[in-house]
Amino acid sequence: MNNPFQNAMSQLERATKIKKFDEKFLKILSQPNREIRISIPITMDNGKTELFEGYRVQYNNARGPYKGGIRYHQDTDINEVKALAFWMALKCAVANIPMGGGKGGITVNPKLLSKNELEKLSRGWIKLMAPVIGPKVDVPAPDVNTTPEIMSWMVDEYSKITGDKTNAVITGKPIAVGGSEGRGPATGLGGFYVFDIIRQKLGLPESCDIIIQGFGNVGGNAAEILTDHGHKIIAISDSKGAILKEDGIDIKALNEYKKTNGQIANFPGSKNITNEELLTTPCDVLIPAALENQITGKNAKEIKTQLIVELANGPTTPEADDILFERNIPVVPDILANAGGVTVSTFEWEQNIKGEHWKEEDVFAKLKKIMEEETEIIWNRSKELNTDIRRTAFVIALERIESAGLVHVID
């Protein structure tokens, strides 16, 4: 299987066959502006010193400061982070917000660390990255396995090192330290606004049978929002397994069950299924909200849905994209579907810079306007270009980045 960065570059190549772009521009965009790799030494609770590898990729800042999350995962590596940073650059352009693209990570299984070790690791990442980030330079945020509490440790450490008091260097913080109202559900809610427009365009029912892969912050919030709007979640998964309940899962009850049991398997009234079965169970809408490379050339022919909405980053490989396009199964790409998170993160950054705090209803109103407007633009353009939604979103993002200007090329 291709690594995520190869997939990202394949997506770029596919899009540039739809519309030609300047060769210098594409050459520059084929690699990030900067890759940073660090070694973080931590004294563990047992007194031993362990080294952890950390990353920050600053992909492109033509449209504003680098922006993107930090993920803690045992499989995280530089190629994954490069791909995520590239997608972030395009995602911010698709949402038409004044940010560039970046991403960070640490190769670690955070579930094996104590809270004390996790805090040391998080502060260590910031200590080594402080010279290359900042409110007007690079603004990290949470991602897989990172939380508002971790962001609070990071912003506190950055403040100690630099004296910055705006707290604008990190987003996704708790409200008490400058976080934004509405940040928690922002990715899921933004995805819902996009989905609802596309659902109407495709003539899908007002009450859809939906499958969600992933029950973390994004998948869990999306499940609640969708059920609140009359849709039915018939299958869902977490990192330990998946469940199916064809008459609909009570998401609030499932939340309580997981808090008690640490997993969703064996939820009363449901059937345990595998991740492979989850992805190929018939439904109206399939929402991958976990990790990349889930829908591939191997299983794309078995997908039985009318619409895929990518709330995860990079869940569909280019090979799968081609198969799904041939099968007339629309894919709402990650750079549109999950852009709600970075959009509200940008609202948080703006509030911090201006010393303001916006009400939740104002945050959601601003988010709704952006997501609906950009979805309409991309949908209409896809009809003009006679291509899929992903390639259209890429074309629009590339046009916006190109028009912003890039690093000067020395002739």
Image (cartoon, rainbow, N blue to C red):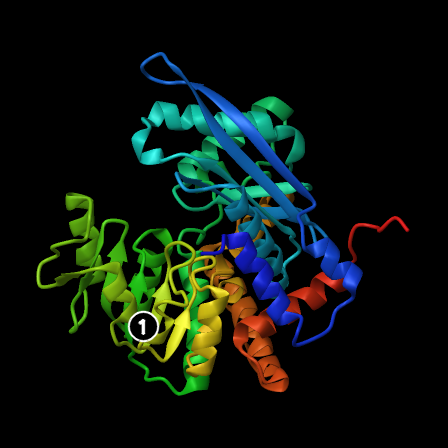
**Is there any visible trace of residue 303 in the rendered image?**
no
Q: Which residue is mark 1?
A: 229
Horizontally, residue 236 falls left or right of residue 119, namely left
User: Which residue shows up at 52% across the image and 66% down it?
Assistant: 336
Crowd rating for badge 1 (residues with CA inside 10 Å; few <14, some 14–19, many 20+): few
When the figure is inspected, residue 80 is found, relative to residue 288, above or below; the finding is: above
Horizontally, residue 400 falls left or right of residue 125, namely right
Amino acid beneath label 1: His
Question: Residue 272 appears at what percent x and percent y?
Answer: 14, 60
**Is there any visible trace of residue 86 in the rendered image?**
yes
Number of marks: 1
Question: Residue 17 appears at what percent x and percent y?
Answer: 66, 74
When the figure is inspected, residue 122 is found, relative to residue 260, above or below; the finding is: above
User: Which residue shows up at 39% across the image and 87% down it?
Assistant: 203
Which residue is the extreme one toward the top? 47
- Secondary structure type for disc 1: loop
Horizontally, residue 6 falls left or right of residue 233, namely right
Which residue is the extreme one toward the bottom? 203
